[in-house]
Image (cartoon, helix red, strand yellow):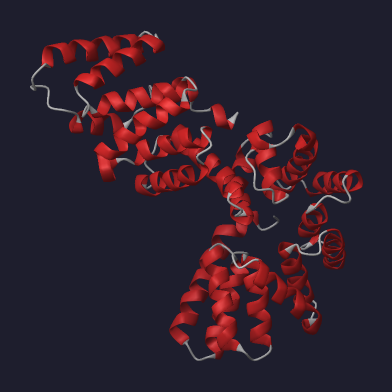
Amino acid sequence: MIVRTLKAPFVQALGAFSLVLLMTGSCWARPGADSFEELAAQAAAARAANDIPKAMDLYRQALQARPGWVEGWWFLGTLSYDSDQYAGGKDALSHLVQLLDTRAAPALTMLGLCEYSTGDYVNALDHIQSGLKLSNGKLETSIEAVARFHEALLLTKTGLYDSALQHLFPFAKAHPADSALTMGIGLAALRQPLTPEEVPANRKDLIGAAGKATYLWMTGDADNAEAGFRTLLAKYPREANVHFLYGSFLVDRRADDAISEFRQELAVNPSNPAAQAMLALQLYRAGKFDEAWPYASQAAEAGAKLPKAQLALGLLLTKKGQTGDGIGHLQSACELEPGDFECHAALASAYSRLGRAEEARRERFTTMQLAKETAPSAEH
């Protein structure tokens, strides 16, 4: 199970970070060194013997004697995390981050994981993303996997559903479906700003069914995915985003059926900006520009941070000859969803229309890079 990957073996897997801790630890020649060194040695021995409660108690005593002891805060924080004592882990790792400053990538990441488990979601996302960025791909594999999974869950919690699904896609490709993964995918797919732990008991079947069908879609099992979506739709025809989800699946398969599903979604939930945006895009692709316009306008107004809404309005403004205005929306779409090929291709075309050759070349280069990266997954 992804969310448990870190637990028992984690505190043994310090890798290069242990060297940083030792190099940045307190000077061993300070007053009271004898007492401190004895406590530190006892704490390490208890940890090695897997006597975790005793080790944590000894680390706390040693840290009272020497509050600047970097290694002590690290082990206290990670042992607390491994023991599901997340509030204590959050406190210890906060001290560690203050001591390490810019060298704190693993500590920031672990702090974010503790904050997630205490419900401090805003800080959790900030610290996990900061830790991942600072680490530059050099975190322990187990730490990075769990951090990236929780980053995806937090993106869903903050309403960034499309980005969350992009982050969850590698997990679907690499891991068998389990409850945490399918619930995480289901929440993002149905655009529910919750974590898996927050799903009410009476909603778990709905979220789980959506997650299983979307998991099959992500892994390329289109036939079973469609069967799953049809079953979901038959059981929950009036639930928000169920028609939208099925319509999204149909976009690259049966365009007219996708349009029908987006219309049905808006019949259930008329103010759904994601469905408005996708309907506008499908109508645009079908050459029905006048019909697409009101949906794109409403979607962009209601969903300023919705990349598909910005894309739809940018495309339609450009089609109307209002390329200058359209570029702003296309730029927003690319910023919100940097990996979207269509956004960059549309922006390149708009720049060309205005004679902005250098910017057009840059966007074309980006589209070529994205095409290379996504070629193996083109079916999805």
Residue drawn 25% across the image and 29% down it:
70
- Where is residue 126 shown, x and y percent of the image? 44, 48
Among the 4 quarters of the image, the one containing residue 50: top left
Residue 22 position, x and y percent, is 21, 28
Front-most of residues 134 and 207: 207
Relative horizontal placement of residue 80, taking residue 277 as reference (left or right):
left
When the figure is inspected, residue 207 is found, relative to residue 341, above or below; the finding is above
- Vertical placement of residue 337 versus 230, above or below: below
Between residues 138 and 60, which one lies in front from this camera angle? 60
Q: Is residue 373 above or below residue 164?
A: below
In the picture, the quarter occupied by the N terminus is: top right
x and y percentages locating residue 307 in the rendered image = 61, 66
Q: Residue at x 33, y 30 (%)?
A: 15
Residue most extreme to the right? 234
Identify which residue is drawn at 59% across, 87% down.
323
Q: Is residue 319 left or right of residue 353?
A: right
| Above or below for 143 versus 299 | above
Total numbered labels: 0
Q: Is residue 21 visible?
A: yes
The C terminus - image quarter: bottom right
Is residue 349 in view? no
- Residue beneath the point at 69% across and 38% down: 183
